[in-house]
Image (cartoon, coloured by chain):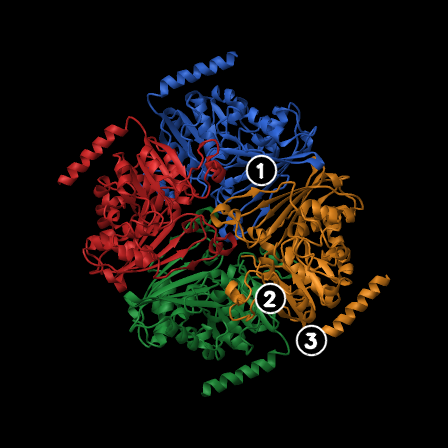
Chain colours: A orange, B blue, C green, D red
Amino acid sequence: MLLLIMVQMIDSFRGSTYHTCMIKAGIIGATGYAGEEIVRLLTGHPEVEIKYLSSRTYQGEPFTDIFSQFNTLLSDRCVSMDIAEMADSCDVIFLALPHGLTFSQVTEDILLKTVIIDLGADFRLKNEDVYEKWYGVKHTNTKILKQAVYGLCELNRIEIAASRLIANPGCYTTCSILSLAPLLAEKRINPSSIIIDAKSGISGAGRSLSRGVHYAECNESVKAYKAASHRHAPEIEQELSILAGEDVMLTFTPHLIPMNRGILTTSYASLKKSTSLDDLFYLYKNFYRNEHFVRILDPGKLPETRFVRSSNFIDIGFALDERLNRVIIVGAIDNLIKGAAGQAVQNMNILFGYPEEEGLTAIPAVL
Amino acid sequence: MLLLIMVQMIDSFRGSTYHTCMIKAGIIGATGYAGEEIVRLLTGHPEVEIKYLSSRTYQGEPFTDIFSQFNTLLSDRCVSMDIAEMADSCDVIFLALPHGLTFSQVTEDILLKTVIIDLGADFRLKNEDVYEKWYGVKHTNTKILKQAVYGLCELNRIEIAASRLIANPGCYTTCSILSLAPLLAEKRINPSSIIIDAKSGISGAGRSLSRGVHYAECNESVKAYKAASHRHAPEIEQELSILAGEDVMLTFTPHLIPMNRGILTTSYASLKKSTSLDDLFYLYKNFYRNEHFVRILDPGKLPETRFVRSSNFIDIGFALDERLNRVIIVGAIDNLIKGAAGQAVQNMNILFGYPEEEGLTAIPAVL
Amino acid sequence: MLLLIMVQMIDSFRGSTYHTCMIKAGIIGATGYAGEEIVRLLTGHPEVEIKYLSSRTYQGEPFTDIFSQFNTLLSDRCVSMDIAEMADSCDVIFLALPHGLTFSQVTEDILLKTVIIDLGADFRLKNEDVYEKWYGVKHTNTKILKQAVYGLCELNRIEIAASRLIANPGCYTTCSILSLAPLLAEKRINPSSIIIDAKSGISGAGRSLSRGVHYAECNESVKAYKAASHRHAPEIEQELSILAGEDVMLTFTPHLIPMNRGILTTSYASLKKSTSLDDLFYLYKNFYRNEHFVRILDPGKLPETRFVRSSNFIDIGFALDERLNRVIIVGAIDNLIKGAAGQAVQNMNILFGYPEEEGLTAIPAVL
Amino acid sequence: MLLLIMVQMIDSFRGSTYHTCMIKAGIIGATGYAGEEIVRLLTGHPEVEIKYLSSRTYQGEPFTDIFSQFNTLLSDRCVSMDIAEMADSCDVIFLALPHGLTFSQVTEDILLKTVIIDLGADFRLKNEDVYEKWYGVKHTNTKILKQAVYGLCELNRIEIAASRLIANPGCYTTCSILSLAPLLAEKRINPSSIIIDAKSGISGAGRSLSRGVHYAECNESVKAYKAASHRHAPEIEQELSILAGEDVMLTFTPHLIPMNRGILTTSYASLKKSTSLDDLFYLYKNFYRNEHFVRILDPGKLPETRFVRSSNFIDIGFALDERLNRVIIVGAIDNLIKGAAGQAVQNMNILFGYPEEEGLTAIPAVL
């Protein structure tokens, strides 16, 4: 309760400070897909001014040379990464870097001066041994790691508001956790029975060139990859374990789908006791009753990724296999928005006391 | 044993009769996608002559007006459906009709004159009550139903050879059954634990116009549909139950993928005891040791639908979730070839004593 | 000059009336793709309230049942078309109907009460004989036709502002005219030499089901259609003739491209005298110097449809074939935005005295 | 006439020699897309045995590790390029290398031992200055260049049969030349009026990784590139000049289309005198009357790339713009087959006296 009051105080303080002027934002890793989407969203955010776009690869080049969609709209050049300098003049820094590059950058000094929203993996896993096991790198900044809050807005809103370092969740993770949270929180399913079969558009593989996302090598084809060995699995387990109040281990298999954007997760679990679609519907509706970005579909309907495209929504629907007392939960997000940049902006809104929808009001562009 | 000899006699008899002249084939429902693919495959088959192309919709029109790819290669016009007349002059009739339209057509009289390979659903389910439950139509030809053989070539080759009525399996079905058969036959998995998450290209929805497959309504999107209520589920269960020697019930969820061709099934099951990838590899390799069209991928590799495109192959790979003692089996086929027309031709080859690869030697067209 | 003052008076009057309350808008044909995009754009427009969504096909159904992307964001049901009733309570009515259905609807009475923005073809061609020739329907409302203004915002802004009936241009038309306007206005090219080779995404074919846009019949393929016989040709010729001050006849060939959105026009013309890329660049830059939505690319760069996706921009670039003294102009728009709904909203902004960008500030969603 | 007899003698000699045993073939550059398609076609060719698959990048690796579609069908490993060694044991060598790498490889010595079919650009342009101008590399092997025959089978069949070095045409080139040849040979069009607007699937950009063909950077978009500066233009001009009996200069603009395979060329030209569609139809039909791979569509029909996919056909259709006395010719090929590997095999068949269709009988795979 005290925490809540403090949070509200901080919020109102922040509000009063920042509403009159604009939030100054820096983006490190601005020329990846997530980085570009943050730039796009912030450009449309009424309360934010972009101060720095940083890119290792394109240092010195106009941002519009890399992303021509910003032609005539943005005149910034990419700068080199100097997080200390940025921290002096930015209220918030978004980090969108490959894992292993971030944890050395974020110091206590930096966090005294600015707020960090990290879209990478370095601060997501609370246990540094788990991090080392899955990422093959020793975590060298466990002190700062302890300060990080897992930025899944709908579940951790209060902690986020009070934090200076947000670990923005992975794309598969966001969709998986939000799809399963009500069932685990309400102890309706057997945790060891969970299987998540996930499907991602190809932008999820990032902007770096590689054989697997060369057009003619992935167009008109579907494949599974990293079955039971993808790095988002421990992240999903960590957060679902907290919700369930017990250790959750699950099987996670991602697939690559020939489309630009979108993630669909199809999750399977055994019900502790039989239920109805209506009952599940009300369970979810109630769990997410105050959530603007979570849309529970009417019983009998299942999501399609196009209905959330370019938006920060997650659509959730379900089916029952009554013969086997199994529930099937289908979630859909835009991997680059709710799965990355949109959630990062939502986290920023929480941190600075703005309405969570600010800058995220785009209606899904279904075509 | 006696059956085997009889089969071989029939085969050799058929061989001696037909090898000198060509098999005469009729196709009913030639202007659907499966029908068109049968025409394409038979046109390239060295031992077959197409006598009739029948279409309800395009009666009287040149086949090349509907499928311009056959321009200059085929001069036939579509005829109306007269199965009795066809039976008089055809050695084999392929039926590619919607369910409910076939069972009244196939009579004992017809079967005395010709061999039927039915790509529809009317003779796949051995139990007419199960048929009625899933298809909502009462089966009115249960006598003939008893004569039908389920035409999954790799599993039922001998019965196929001795039959006059082949129920060609569904597309999802073929991929699912062949992916799981070795594990169930060898009692390695718990049957009630099976979950099949299937992904199909859009040609699987057929050639009839509908909102869901209007280009802009399915391109750049993925969705689940008919979760736990798709009609291929009872077909998979029927055949896997035979293999397992016990009743198999499973959860089956199909998805629609924005690509023309291909099915990928990702199947999950609990292992009775822990095993290794190598062990699974040898189990599958041995089970399918004589099968030209089944390719077991090296341990650690997973299939992609593009690697079987336009071919009659199924590629199978697997992964283990050792923490949960769960196996993940991934199968890939071309839904129109091994999942429909190709398997129909393979069945024809078995019936007439030809090498199974005849007319099916196309190397996958990966692009 | 007087006209301009009148326009500004009307504008300021309109402005003073409407800025305090919201514009009330009705959309007829709201469940086609253009209609849906108008709804999407108006929902995000700060000064507009949607009063009616009308649909012949879906009368009585919730709009979100047809377009699930609006789930939780819009509660309207589709109503039948009663333009007279709408006119009483709407400040503006958008018509998005097939040709031939509109001209009987728009009466003087209606135009006294409300402003009409017609996205169909019925008021685009000023000569009713040309209309009849290309559309095969006799125009029965030539009196009203005379009042219509061709709503290509960048060229006819002033007339638009003073009108009550706007004929919103076609998609191919907008891209073609804006690409060629400076060259014709400045008499740089030989009008009879113009060839426009246009490429459109498949949403351009509309939402009605048809064989040609059934997914598997157009995916992974490109074709030309209606070469030298497409109905947008006379519309392009009409407007370019006005600009050129002489009759322009040209060859127009559209193509269908396997993608949802976007139009690219590649136009060819013979230069009256040789020139340089830089010269052309400044010609275009100058001609469109005050236009927010027209982006002239730097010499040597050519547009891609993705860089304007979901936005109201047109990108224009050029190349020279110096050996043949020919200029190649490439234009790119989003066919549903600048080619339909976006331009309609831009027209509304002009009519009601708002900044033209209002509600159209979306940055192109490149992925 | 003498030449013809000699050719026939050579052919019959070759026939008698090689029909009893198999042609031994080597492929250099086997792991590009054109190389892979040659391997695929030759594997299905009844008279060819592949001896060498050479790859600079994948030397020592099993070919199936790179192209899993050949799994179980091909056991070769990639070898390094040793053209001299290959020449000793191969009857034909296919070269599929980037320009500039080939001309130094092909010596008189090599050509005494084997026949070369070069899919690259080094021997296509007869004039070494033109080569240097467009490719920026000095041609260092002009002596051998003089021996090369331009391998557009339908036009140069006799010279091909008598040659030892075939310059296999480019993909855009093949489609453009065959589309325009009858009109120029019959002097029906004004050569200086020709404009070719070409559209290619993305496999045309090759297998090397690059930003422009990274999936999410080209999917759902269309663009023009190298307008009036693409290297296939001089090749088209060279061959059309020969046909026209006068110098032909034309404007050529290629576009990239989001699909794997296929080229569509839309060519425009001014007619010397007015004509009818029927007249054009008979002109083309007659010009290509003996050509299996050239399909002239009925008047009023236009080609689609899907109808030639995976086949060696070119489909040609036309339209007239009678008002401007302009003809529009649309051609469609599979860029990897008739535009590369298929034509290379067709050239091999001509060289060795086989029916031209041998190994090229695949019916287009429309889906």
In this view, the residue in front, A285 or D231, is: D231
Residue C275 relative to residue B197: left or right: left
- Disc on res. B265: 1
In this view, the residue in front, A153 or D241, is: D241
Task: Determine the CA span between mark 1 and mark 2.
Answer: 43 Å
Q: Position of residue B332 (x, y in %)?
A: 53, 37
Q: Residue at x 21, y 53 (%)?
A: D242
Residue B143 placement: quadrant: top right
Outermost left residue: D2
- Please tell me if label 2 and label 3 are on a single chain: yes
- Disc on res. A53: 2
Quarter of the figure that contains the C terminus of chain C:
bottom right
Other-residue count near label 2 (Cα within 10 Å), few / some / many at <14 / 14–19 / ≥20: many
Q: Position of residue B155 (x, y in %)?
A: 54, 24
Return the disc, 2 or 3, that comes first in the chain's sequence. Answer: 3
Residue C240 placement: quadrant: bottom left
- Please tell me if label 1 and label 2 are on a single chain: no
- Residue placed under numbered mark 3 in the picture: A21
Task: Determine the CA span between mark 1 and mark 3.
Answer: 54 Å
Other-residue count near label 1 (Cα within 10 Å), few / some / many at <14 / 14–19 / ≥20: many
Three-letter amino acid code at the position of disc 2:
Leu
Secondary structure of residue under mark 1: strand
Outermost bottom residue: C2
- Please tell me if label 1 and label 3 are on a single chain: no
Three-letter amino acid code at the position of disc 3:
Cys
In the image, residue B116 sits, relative to residue D6, either above or below, namely above
In this view, the residue in front, D140 or A141, is: D140
Q: Position of residue A202 (x, y in %)?
A: 55, 51
Secondary structure of residue under mark 3: loop
Parent chain of label 2: A
Does residue B78 appear in the picture of this structure? no
